[in-house]
Image (spheres, rainbow, N blue to C red):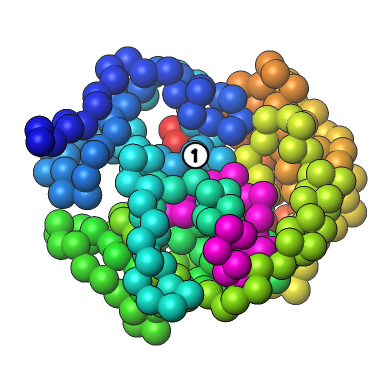
Amino acid sequence: MERKKMIISENHIMKRHSNMKIGGVAKNFIEIESKEELFPLLKKSKNYFIIGNGTNTLINDEYLDIDFISLKKLRNITVIGENKINVEAGLDFGFLIRYMSENDLSGLEELSGIPGTVGGLIFMNGGAYGREIFDCIESVEILDSDGNIKTIEKKDLKIGYRYTEIKEKSWVVLSANFSFKKGFNKELVKEIKTKRETNQPIELPNLGSTFKNPEGYFSARLIIDAGLQGLKIGGAQVSLKHPNFIVNDGTATFNDVLNIVKTVQDTVKEKFNVNLEKEIIVIK
């Protein structure tokens, strides 16, 4: 059977790949069919970015001389043992939650509703409500900067709050081995869904949490205390529903969002001498 080739789309509109609904025209958008295609592609490209669902990625709305590479076709789930599965990086995280529900696997219910890919959450050790994705990971398969595909045990990886060694070294997540317990908690998932709908502006384009929580503080509380909730610059606004979210009213530009991010950082630093570090990724 003939192997499918990667799909390359030139002068690709990136707005459709951003949860913020902001993005210009990219040189290329490339969908690979296998992990073996990846390193030759990276070696050939002068400027590239591995993109997932664009749920936490702010993309410049001008021309982007970048090859955006999508792993979305790498989305298989393979059973590797009792309550253990291997999941490829391109799978939507929501599909993993659905698989867990269908197979009565438990451990990541608190993360339900996060709209990213499995690889994206692993890359930054994504989490919510006291749970992180690495809580259920045994090992991660990565492509390193020398083109080696290797599996690294969790115990041999540096991980922390919204941090991984994978991100620090610009490795690419290919898949991960997960270990779960039995007993999927459907009631907890319903509870998390209600919390998200009540407390987060999911009805408007956004990038999720804009800032990491500084040690000893909550970013949302700092933003409220600085008098910034509801601040609007152009079409971007500090959400009235959750101040650590910036929303797009449909007219926001890349610079609107950058300006509001900087205003929040500068004001919080001036008032409380606390640095707010961005959780979002900015592609200029």
Image coords of residue 25 (percent x, y): 40, 18
Judged left or right of residue 184, residue 64 is: left
Q: Which residues are magenta?
A: 100-120
Residue plotted at (53% across, 31% down): 18
Amino acid type assigned to the residue bearing label 1 in the image: Asn
65 in magenta: no
103 in magenta: yes
Residue closest to the eye, 21 or 149: 149
Residue plotted at (29% across, 33% down): 31
- Is residue 255 visible in this depiction of the protein? no
Image coords of residue 37 (percent x, y): 16, 43
Residue plotted at (17% across, 31% down): 5
Residue plotted at (24% across, 39% down): 33
- The answer to which quarter of the image holds residue 184 is bottom right
Q: Is residue 252 above or below residue 114?
A: above
Q: Is residue 10 above or below residue 165?
A: above
Q: Is residue 182 above or below residue 38?
A: below
